[in-house]
């Protein structure tokens, strides 16, 4: 849940003040009840990078990998207790029906299920929330098999429609349950709940029911859902890269892309395409380790290739002609399942960009006010991914180390060059110090054990890695620098770097590339400012709160 800016501690307020605010807030919501409400109070500049839309790839009808994911879930047991709580039950049933396995038992279980809670965020005042998690998958089951009575029995379909699909009509829930209308609901809950409501209405109307209660145009559902999707398309996600919530957001979008009418379906596809393009620009060979908003307890994760977004992508790729890629899904199995069974397929250039950075690029992705950016510098065979910055405990942003991804099969943070600082507390880092072929931080560079320097001098080291990539590092307790070169002789470039950067004290504020740019930076930059300050004494735009959605020197023709 995200608290509106006007209220920070509504539980601590005097009752009279609280009631007054509730009245004011409810009047504001009621005054807008006939139209959509914006859950973020700004509109971002789109920048100069266009999300590609071209789809010409031939996708296979069947996938052994996808079927194996379905089988893993189909083989899972279901206990009686699992029928009345959030968990894997609905996905197990989806997998069994998709594989046509234990169909009668799956129908019997669905007919036994009841609505055990309410939709929306669960918290201390709403302990039975989160019903929208199973509701979303029940919606998938309903739409996927509603015209196949040999798979979804008529009695089961009626039970789904009249009991389990609990949301219908035109009530769009912008705020979280039991918060007196003062707390905006999260993106994933809005999409899961309201997407399921919209799709139930749509099916009923398609059967010839003329009641305006189910008319998504007349009751305002289409307008509000489109507004929410357009806002995500324009501004990105508030809970960007979230672990675990990105997976549930994508699942809800997949339902809309598959089953909504054309206007809503196309807009949901646009949001999915944006999320995927953002992933492609900040990853290499499915190594993806960006900053994220929520949750703090996930900050200890060090796996590079198994975040929840990656789970979907690995299933999608299994329908392509690409065979050689990391197929480990780790803890993302439930999301790999949805990628495996849903019809969405990504764009051509997204698939290409995952593995081929062409001549390289430098890209900045903004996430709006009081957030943190994503910054990526790519060459032909490497990508530097900035770790971001926490904006205070209430921001719930997890900053991560700056990472150097190489064109290899590494999948854990310990196996790659990375840097962060000061100290080990991510709440204190500003790891936005990434520029073209360069990274800096107020802490040391981690060198993987399997790399041996080809040259050393003091705190300087040079490493010759795969595909003619040379990595030069400077590492001390309070300063880490990393520069990357392609197609050079490692010892020669090492000597040139040392010659241009002989003054150690200057290294704390600037770095000179041999025959290249002079970069200025502030390792103690405040948390609302980019660490990078200048290139060749020309000031850089450091106010990343105002950065566009996607901007950079991407040397591609986008279609």
Image (spheres, rainbow, N blue to C red):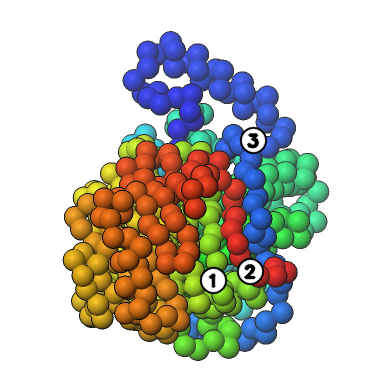
Question: Residue tagged by mark 2?
Answer: 555
Q: Residues within 10 Å of mark 2 (few under 14, many from 20)?
A: few
Earlier along the polypeptide chain: callout 3 or callout 2? 3
Among numbered discs 3 and 1, the one appearing first in the sequence: 3
Residue 274 point in image, percent of width and height: 61, 60
The residue identified by callout 1 is 360
Residue 410, horizontal then vertical, whole percent: 34, 78
Give the Cα distance between marks 3 and 1: 40 Å
Q: Are marks 1 and 2 in contact (CB under 8 Å)?
A: yes
Q: Specify whether residue 313 is in view.
A: no
Q: Residue 329 appears at what percent x and percent y?
A: 39, 74
> Toward which corner of the image does residue 348 lie, by quadrant?
bottom right
Q: Is residue 518 above or below residue 174?
A: below
Q: Secondary structure at mark 3?
A: loop
Q: Are marks 3 and 1 in contact (CB under 8 Å)?
A: no
Name the residue: 47% across, 67% down: 515
Circle 3 residue? 37
Front-lying residue, 305 or 224 = 305
Between 537 and 397, the one lying in front of the other is 537
């Amino acid at each position: 849940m995200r608290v509106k800016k006007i209220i920070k501690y509504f539980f601590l307020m005097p009752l009279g003040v609280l009631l007054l605010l509730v009245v004011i807030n409810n009047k504001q919501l009621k005054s807008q009840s006939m139209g959509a409400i914006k859950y973020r109070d700004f509109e971002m500049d789109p920048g100069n990078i266009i999300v590609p839309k071209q789809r010409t790839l031939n996708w296979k009808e069947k996938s052994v990998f996808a079927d194996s994911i379905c089988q893993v879930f189909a083989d899972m047991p279901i206990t009686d207790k699992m029928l009345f709580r959030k968990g894997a039950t609905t996905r197990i049933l989806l997998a069994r029906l998709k594989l046509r396995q234990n169909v009668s038992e799956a129908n019997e279980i669905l007919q036994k299920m009841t609505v055990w809670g309410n939709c929306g965020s669960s918290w201390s005042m709403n302990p039975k929330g989160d019903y929208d998690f199973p509701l979303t998958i029940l919606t998938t089951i309903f739409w996927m098999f509603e015209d196949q009575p040999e798979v979804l029995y008529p009695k089961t379909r009626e039970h789904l429609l009249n009991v389990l699909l609990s949301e219908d009509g035109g009530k769009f829930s912008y705020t979280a349950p039991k918060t007196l209308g003062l707390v905006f609901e999260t993106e994933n809950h809005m999409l899961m709940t309201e997407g399921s409501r919209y799709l139930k209405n749509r099916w009923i109307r398609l059967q010839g029911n003329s009641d305006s209660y189910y008319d998504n145009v007349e009751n305002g559902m289409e307008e509000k859902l489109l507004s929410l999707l357009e806002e995500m398309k324009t501004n990105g996600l508030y809970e960007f890269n979230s672990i675990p919530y990105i997976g549930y957001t994508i699942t809800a979008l997949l339902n809309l892309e598959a089953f909504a009418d054309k206007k809503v379906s196309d807009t949901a596809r646009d949001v999915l395409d944006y999320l995927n393009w953002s992933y492609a620009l900040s990853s290499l060979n499915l190594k993806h380790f960006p900053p994220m908003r929520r949750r703090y307890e996930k900050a200890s994760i060090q796996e590079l290739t198994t975040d929840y977004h990656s789970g979907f992508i690995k299933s999608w790729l299994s329908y392509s002609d690409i065979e050689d890629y990391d197929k480990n899904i780790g803890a993302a199995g439930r999301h790999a399942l949805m990628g495996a069974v849903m019809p969405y397929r990504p764009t051509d250039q997204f698939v290409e960009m995952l593995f081929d950075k062409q001549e390289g690029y430098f890209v900045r992705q903004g996430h709006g006010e009081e957030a943190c950016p994503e910054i990526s510098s790519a060459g032909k065979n490497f990508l530097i991914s900035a770790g971001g910055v926490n904006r205070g405990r209430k921001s719930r942003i997890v900053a991560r180390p700056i990472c150097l991804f190489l064109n290899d099969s590494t999948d854990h943070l310990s196996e790659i060059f990375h840097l962060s600082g000061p100290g080990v507390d991510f709440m204190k880092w500003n790891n936005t110090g990434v520029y073209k072929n360069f990274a800096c931080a107020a802490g040391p560079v981690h060198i993987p054990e399997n790399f041996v320097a080809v040259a050393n001098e003091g705190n300087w080291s040079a490493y010759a890695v795969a595909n003619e990539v040379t990595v030069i590092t400077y590492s001390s307790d309070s300063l880490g620098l990393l520069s990357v070169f392609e197609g050079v002789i490692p010892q020669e470039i090492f000597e040139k770097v040392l010659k241009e950067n002989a003054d150690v004290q200057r290294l704390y504020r600037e770095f000179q590339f041999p025959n290249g740019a002079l970069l200025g930076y502030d390792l103690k930059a405040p948390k609302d400012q980019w660490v990078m300050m200048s290139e060749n004494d020309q000031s850089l735009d450091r106010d990343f709160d105002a950065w566009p959605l996607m901007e950079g020197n991407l040397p591609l023709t986008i279609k």
